[in-house]
């Protein structure tokens, strides 16, 4: 009686497996970076929103309109309808951001200085 044994040799999938794992890790890293950027943007919006709601306002902001946030020499913030360009060459305040009031009464930051 003869016994036949089959030997099954698994293909070498090491390289393919490593490539797939690397691809998955790259996707996860990209997602982490995106989430970090989004969290940073939310933090910046919260910071600017806090400054806006503490700012001096001679106006009642209207939803959908663009406003400009400045800081005076005493460190107080103020919200204005006048852009930095409209002040001319001698702007009396430090420009902080250009913002738009959204329907839920949060502020969309359209433009800002690098450092908030």
Image (cartoon, helix red, strand yellow):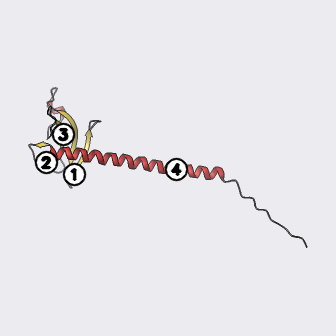
Q: Which residue is mark 2?
A: 61
Lower position in the chain sequence, tag 3 or tag 2: 2
Q: Residues within 10 Å of mark 1 (few under 14, many from 20)?
A: some
Residue at the spot x=72%, y=58% of the render?
10
* Outermost residue toward the top in this view: 89
Q: Position of residue 110 (x, y in %)?
A: 26, 43
Quick one: SS at disc 3?
A: strand
Lower position in the chain sequence, tag 3 or tag 1: 3
* Outermost residue toward the bottom in this view: 1
Quick one: SS at disc 1?
A: loop
Q: Residues within 10 Å of mark 4 (few under 14, many from 20)?
A: few
Q: Which residue is mark 3?
A: 69
Residues at circles 4 and 1 in contact by the CB criterion of under 8 Å: no
How far apart are labels 4 and 1 at the CA level? 36 Å
Nearer to me, 110 or 17: 17
How far apart are labels 3 and 1 at the CA level? 14 Å
Nearer to me, 53 or 90: 53
How far apart are labels 3 and 2 at the CA level? 12 Å
Give the vertical position of 4 relative to 81 (above or below). below
Lower position in the chain sequence, tag 4 or tag 3: 4
Q: Which mark is residue 87?
A: none
Residue at the spot x=64%, y=49% of the render?
15
Residues at circles 2 and 1 in contact by the CB criterion of under 8 Å: no
> Is 28 left, or right, of 61 in this rendering?
right
How far apart are labels 2 and 1 at the CA level? 11 Å
Q: Which residue is mark 4?
A: 25
Q: Which residue is mark 1?
A: 106
* Outermost residue toward the left in this view: 58
Quick one: SS at disc 2?
A: loop
Quick one: SS at disc 4?
A: helix
How far apart are labels 4 and 3 at the CA level? 41 Å
Lower position in the chain sequence, tag 2 or tag 1: 2
């Amino acid at each position: 009686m003869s016994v036949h044994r089959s030997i099954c040799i698994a293909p070498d999938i090491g390289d393919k497996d490593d490539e797939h794992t690397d691809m998955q890790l790259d996707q996860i890293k990209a997602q982490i970076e995106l989430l970090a950027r989004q969290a940073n943007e939310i933090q910046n919006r919260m910071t600017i929103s806090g400054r806006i709601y503490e700012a001096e306002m001679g106006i009642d902001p209207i939803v959908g309109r663009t406003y400009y946030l400045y800081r005076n020499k005493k460190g107080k913030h103020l919200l204005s309808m006048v852009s930095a360009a409209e002040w001319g060459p001698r702007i009396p305040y430090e420009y902080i951001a250009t913002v738009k009031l959204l329907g839920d009464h949060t502020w969309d930051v359209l433009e800002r200085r690098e450092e908030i």
